[in-house]
Image (spheres, coloured by chain):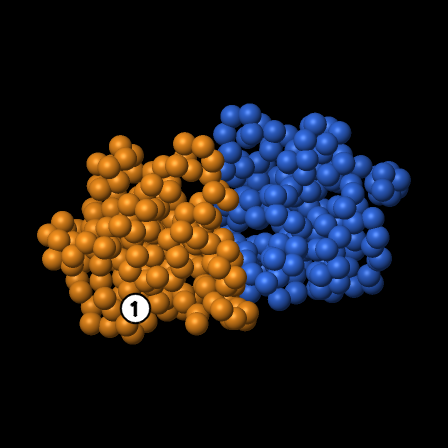
Chain colours: A blue, B orange
């Protein structure tokens, strides 16, 4: 089992951190993970890209070409990476920043205004990355939410730790609601 | 110009952070950079591995196979990665943790007890990563020390920022001393 995850958004959204936590969580589940981010012409263009590959086996080919799971947090990220996804992939969009999106036949798209919900629930946007990741885990089950929240402790302490964990759990719980309700929320 | 840099040591030595700062500094110099770390069987074995590729051109092949520059901060890291380096590569060892090392003909080896010097100069080991990286930049010139210290500001603030910058500059200055003196210090 090899899963390739791509996150794209803008600097300051914490997407690199989120992918690093995912990689640490995978390690806690005795899986292998490779986490990377590129800095350069593309990053300057506005859409940052951060990736994780998770596998039960050793990872020999370290590149994500077409991801299984795609999380996009800005319109620019959507424009740039929105249609590059594997057949039967899972595409998750922050509809707060991506109001204009189109369904694609090869992947299932889930949209939630994570940033707006985060601000409403927690009074800050800063953990929208964790909320979206909790949501992603609820949909994809690529790692357990409990392992993920444990791994958050490798990166944060005190109040920040509590807030990040709450946001991740909140995002995870969002996926347990009915599909109709989700659609309404958009 | 493509340079592949591998850092290996143990968790808590801040080597991932150091490579991320290098990547951000490369971006500030309008270069492209790809930074990655693997988590898995190898990491559990004790030697973490964190890498950066810096290039003037777009980076198509994202894997470091044999690095140009190798920084090793533990004996385990040395045992695991110590001889895997390109012809005419630069190998930098923390002799505080790696008392037993052998020269290799294909690369130039520089050794300094970074961790001990750091503790002596700054009363903490926590910025030995920055000291070693400043030293690495003094030897390799792969990016400017001034860009590197600016990039530290993307990761730290306040007292931590000041301390990290001081340690990086200190490491850089160490390379301006005579070679004999360096050898004496070991």
Please tell me how many numbered marks the rendered image carries.
Answer: 1
Residue A164 located left or right of residue A85: left
Q: Nearer the viewer, residue A88 or A102?
A: A102
Q: Position of residue A79 (x, y in %)?
A: 75, 59
Residue B45 is situated, as x and y percent measured from the top left of the image, at: 35, 51
Q: Is residue A26 visible?
A: no
Residue placed most toward the observer, A67 or A45: A45
Q: Is residue B54 left or right of residue A133?
A: left
Residue at image x 76%, y 36%? Answer: A116
Q: Nearer the viewer, residue A31 or B4?
A: B4
Per the image, the residue denoted by label 1 is B89
Badge 1 local density, few (<14 within 10 Å), some, or many (20+)?
A: many
- Chain that bears disc 1: B
Q: Is residue B64 left or right of residue B83?
A: right
Q: Residue at x 50, y 29 (%)?
A: A157
Compared to residue B124, the image places residue A44 above or below, namely: below
Q: Quadrant of the N terminus of chain A?
A: bottom right
Quadrant of res B91: bottom left
Residue A66 coordinates in the image, percent (x, y) = 66, 65
Image quadrant for the C terminus of chain A? Answer: top right
């Amino acid at each position: 089992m090899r899963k390739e995850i791509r996150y794209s958004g803008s600097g300051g959204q914490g997407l690199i951190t989120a992918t690093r936590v995912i990689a640490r969580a995978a390690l806690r589940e005795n899986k292998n993970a490779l986490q990377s981010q590129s800095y350069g012409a593309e990053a300057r263009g506005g859409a940052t890209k951060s990736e994780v590959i998770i596998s039960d086996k050793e990872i020999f080919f370290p590149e994500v070409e077409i991801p299984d799971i795609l999380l996009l947090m800005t319109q620019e990220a959507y424009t740039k990476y929105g249609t590059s996804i594997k057949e039967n992939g899972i595409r998750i969009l922050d509809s707060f920043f991506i109001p204009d999106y189109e369904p694609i036949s090869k992947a299932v798209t889930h949209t939630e205004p994570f940033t707006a919900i985060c601000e409403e629930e927690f009074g800050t946007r800063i953990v929208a990355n964790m909320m979206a990741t909790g949501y992603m885990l609820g949909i994809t089950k690529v790692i357990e939410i409990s392992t993920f929240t444990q791994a958050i402790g490798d990166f944060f302490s005190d109040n920040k730790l509590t807030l990040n964990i709450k946001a991740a759990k909140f995002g995870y719980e969002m996926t347990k609601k009915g599909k109709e309700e989700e659609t309404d929320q958009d």
